Amino acid sequence: MSLDIKISQVDKTKIDQIDFSNFSFGSVFTDHMFECDYINGKWQNPRILPYQSISIEPSASVFHYGQAIFEGMKAYKDSNDEIWLFRPKENFDRFNKSSVRLAIPEFPEELFFDALKKLLDLEKDWVKKDEGSALYVRPFVIGNEYAIQASPSKNYKFMIICAPAKPYYIGKVKVLVADKYSRAASGGIGFAKAAGNYAGQFYPTNLAKEKGFQQIIWTDSNEHKYLEEAGTMNIFFRIGDKLITAPNTDTILDGVTRKSIIQIAKDLGIHVDIRKISVDEIKEASRNNSLKEIFGTGTAAVVSEISEFEHKDELFTLPEIDDSYAKKLKESLVNIQTNKSEDPHNWRYRV
């Protein structure tokens, strides 16, 4: 699909007003955004314009029936001032997979990448080279038909906005293993990056925070027996010298960082088991001192180490170890993302 993107630039950038050493992730946005509408059965009028409020009626279907999905990726700047995305085709494919599940029209691949490249070219000064810094890129789509009807919207709005990013989770986190609430159920939309999946996590996560935990490890909805995800991240367990993570199902997000960590671990000679892992197994492994590490992976966090977990009022503390898989894997991944090392699997995408 070939559509010309109209570009309207700001008169003056706001970048000089931003203190890049002191801001909250997701609260500062760049000068421009991309917008495209689905009307009369086709995507049309793609445009880049100054970041601004959008006008939308209160009857818009997204407010009532929740057709909203998104993606998250990062742009990195290397020492030569070249800008790279990391495996964006994976994000694009997952975006359309999420769209299909929520009865949203798929977005054209050629237009998606054309929009990304043109937008990031305009915002290249917002991509910083500081350690751990990047530009977070958020494509999303919402149902935009002005009608209160319990059926798929006829109109949609696709947008891309960008936000400077520092490390998302800083330091090790303490987590609570869910034994009542669930993130997703089999046959549902847990595998999709649907807005509603995240809204449903907020209440139980708030309850966990009141008890002193930063995140929740989600378990299966049927028995609360098997471990699935950690907060908004995929999760890995190191028992002995083996790395274990749950298999992809329709309740677990197919994380780009997750699949990259699995491949890097294999490249480094680390044994990876992709299988179900139960709460009882990690509790027993902690008791017999074979549980060495737990860490989450995701675009925002990259790799986030877990220091303690609690299940049914029993608290378990992870040991301090010198040979950390989490640190080793994160370093290897970030070096590929930022063009500091070889890219044996051709994951980098030059903007």
Image (tube, rainbow, N blue to C red):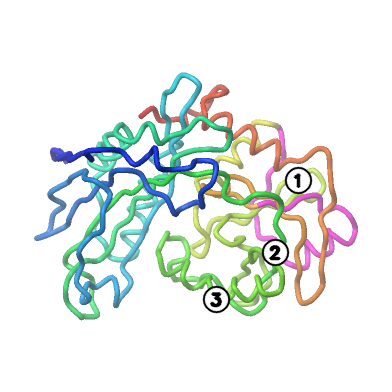
Q: Is residue 138 magenta?
A: no
Amino acid type of the residue that numbered disc 2 sits on in the rendered structure? Val
Residue drawn at x 85%, y 52% as measured from the top left: 290
Farthest residue toward the left? 40
Pointer 3: residues within 10 angstroms few (<14), some, or many (20+)?
few
Magenta segment: 269-295
- x and y percent of residue 168 in the render? 57, 49
Pointer 1: residues within 10 angstroms few (<14), some, or many (20+)?
some
Please identify the quarter of the rendering in which residue 5 is found.
Answer: top left
Is residue 40 toward the left or the right of residue 156 in the image?
A: left
Please identify the quarter of the rendering in which residue 2 is found.
Answer: top left
Amino acid type of the residue that numbered disc 1 sits on in the rendered structure? Lys
Pointer 2: residues within 10 angstroms few (<14), some, or many (20+)?
many
For mark 3, what is the residue?
A: 203
First-in-chain label (2 vs 1): 2
Q: Secondary structure at mark 3?
A: helix
Disc 2 + disc 3, Cβ < 8 Å: no
For mark 1, what is the residue?
A: 242
